[in-house]
Image: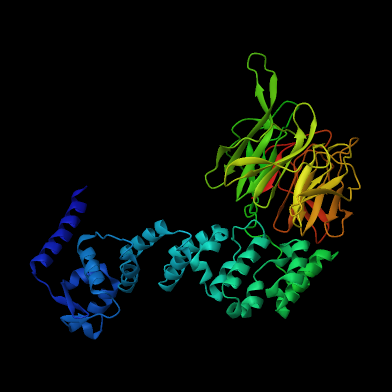
Amino acid sequence: MDEVAEFSKSLLKSMAELRQAGELLDITLKVSGRKVRAHRIVLASGSPYFKAMLTGSLCEREKEEIELKGIDDGILRTLVEFLYSGNISVTEANVQNLLPAANLLQIKAVTNKCCEFLKHQIHIINCIGIAKFADTHDCKELYEYACDFIHEHFKDLCNSEEFNQMEPNELANILSSENLNVDSEENTFEMLERWLQYDPNRRRAYVPKLISHIRLPLMSFKYLTNMYENNEFICESVSAKEAVNRALQYHISEDRSKLMGEKKMQVTCRRPAKMLCAVGGKNGFSATLESVEIYHINTKEWVEVAPLSFRRLDYATAVHDRKLYVIGGTKTKIRSCKGSVHRELDSSVERWNPETNAWTPVANMLRCRSHHASAVFHGKIYALGGYDGETYMRSVECYCPLTNQWSLSPPMLKSRSFFRAVVANGMLYVIGGCGQDINSVERFDPDSETWEMVSPMADKRIDFGVAVLHNYIYVVGGHNGTSHLSSVERYDCNRNKWSVVASLNLARTGLGAAVMGHKLYAVGGHSGSSYLNRVEEYDPDENRWQVIDKMLYCRCNLGLEAL
C-alpha cells in the first residue's frame, strides 16, 4: 500500500477513535428514542443525504440533535460505523432492513454490497420476491438480474409459492417478456393455467388480459383446438375464445403474412435468434473443416469462433437452451506418414456455449450414426436414422440435457439417410433422403407416440436445407439423384399440402437453412462445379431471394443453426 492510501486509511481510523472516545462530536442522530453520536464532517462526506441536510438551507443545519424517521436504530448505528470504518457485514438477517436504509441515506457502497449479496442468494423460491424488493427500492441492476433469473427458470417456478401468490400485473410483465426460457408456447400457457387454478374464482376475470401475452399462433393447431373446445378458462371468456379462434384462423390461412398484419399477431418465438452459426463441413474432396463462424444480425458480419474439438463430417446439429450441439458423424484424421485421410464412424456429441466460446463433450449416442438428422422436440434432442457403416437406419434416439442420457424412441417407418428433420405444429417431421422413397415425408405424434406418412414432396431430394417460417416447412435446394436443385417447396402442416415458392438464385446441394427474424437463410453448399460461401436471404412477403454477405469460408455439408 502506498503512503497516500495508508494516510487515508489512518485518517479514517483516527476519526473512528475520536468518535469512540467521545471527542469533537457535534451531531446526535435520534431514532425511536435512541441516540447515535457522530461528526458532521464524516456524515456529510459519506452520505449525500446527510450532506444536503447539514450543509444546505434546511433547518437541520443548525440543530445539534436530528430525529430520523423510517429507519431502525440498530441499522442506523451499523451504517454510521460503516462511514467511519468502510467495513460492513451483510447477512440474511439484516439485508432487508439494511438496503432500504442505505438507499434512504444514499450510501451507495452499502446499497451495492446488499445487491451483490442478494444476487448470490437468489433461488427459485425467492426470485420473485427479490425482484419486487429491488423494484420497490429502485435497485435497477438487481431488478434486471432477478428478472433474468425468472425468465431463465420460468418452467421451474410452478412449484413456488411466490409464483402462486403473484399479482396479475406482475405475471403479465413476465408473460410479455421476449426472454422466457420455454420449450414451447404451450408451456407458457400451462404456467398461466397453473396460476389461474390456484384461485380460479378470483382470477378468471384476468384471463382476457393475460391471454393477450400468450403467443397463440405459435401453438399447434391440435392444442389450440383442444383449448377452444375444452379449456374452462377459455370457454368462459368471450375475448379469450376469440383470441384462440384468431390463432386457429392463422393456421388455416393461405396468406399468413397478411393475417399477421391485420390482426397484429405476435408470431415471433421467445428468445429470438440473433446469429447464424455455420459449423464445419468441407471445401474440397478430402478437405474437412473444423472451423466455426457466426453471422450477427446486427453487425451483418461473419466472425470466426472456437473450432470443433476435431474434424468431423456428415454429422447433425441442434440448438437447445441457446447452446449448439454437434452430434455423431464421421471422424476424420490425416495420417501423417502417408498424408491419406482416415475416417471412422463416431457417436460422440459436443456442445458449444456462445457465452464462453467453448466446446464441451456430453454423453455419446447409443450408436454411431452418419448422414443422420436431428431436431429438438419437447425439450429433448432427437437423432434419427442415418448410416451405421452397413445399412441405412430407421432407429431413433433422444437426448435429455437434464440427465445427460440418451434413450430409444419409436423408430421411423422408413430407413433414411441424407435427409432432414424439423419440428412444426407440435409434430416431428422427417423429410426426403436416401431410402425407399426420397421424396417421402413422415411425422411423429408425441401424444400417440406413432409415426404416419403424409404428403410427399413434389421433387425427390437429398442433402437439402430445411427450416420453419410462419408455421410452414421450407425445403431448399438439394439434389434429386440427377442434378443440383434451386427449387424450394413449402409444406402447410394443417392442409397436408406442398406448394412451390421462389427458387434460389443458384442451384446447390449440401447447403444449410435456418430462420432468423422473419427471414429464411440458405447458406453454403456445392453448385455442381464449386464449393460455396454464398448466402441467400428469402423474404416470404415478397417471395424473393437475394444474395447477402458471404461466409468467410466455402462450406458444403455444413451444420447451420440459428441461436
- Compare residues 149 and 85 and report the one nearer the observer: 149
What x and y, as percent, mark residue 97? Answer: 32, 70
Residue 436 sits in which quadrant? Answer: top right
What x and y, as percent, mark residue 315? Answer: 70, 36
Which residue is rendered at x = 53% and y = 69% of the image?
A: 164
The residue lying furthest to the top in this view is 337
Residue 412 appears left or right of 559: right
Relative to 114, say whether 30 is above or below. below
Which residue is rendered at x = 48% and y = 60% of the image?
A: 124
Is residue 518 visible in the rendered image? The answer is yes
**Numbered label tally:** 0
Is residue 261 visible in the rendered image? The answer is no
The residue lying furthest to the bottom in this view is 59
Relative to 154, say whether 436 is above or below. above
How does the figure colour the protein chain or chains? Answer: rainbow
Residue 242 sits in which quadrant? Answer: bottom right
What x and y, as percent, mark residue 94? Answer: 30, 66
What x and y, as percent, mark residue 486? Answer: 86, 45
Residue 35 appears left or right of 385: left
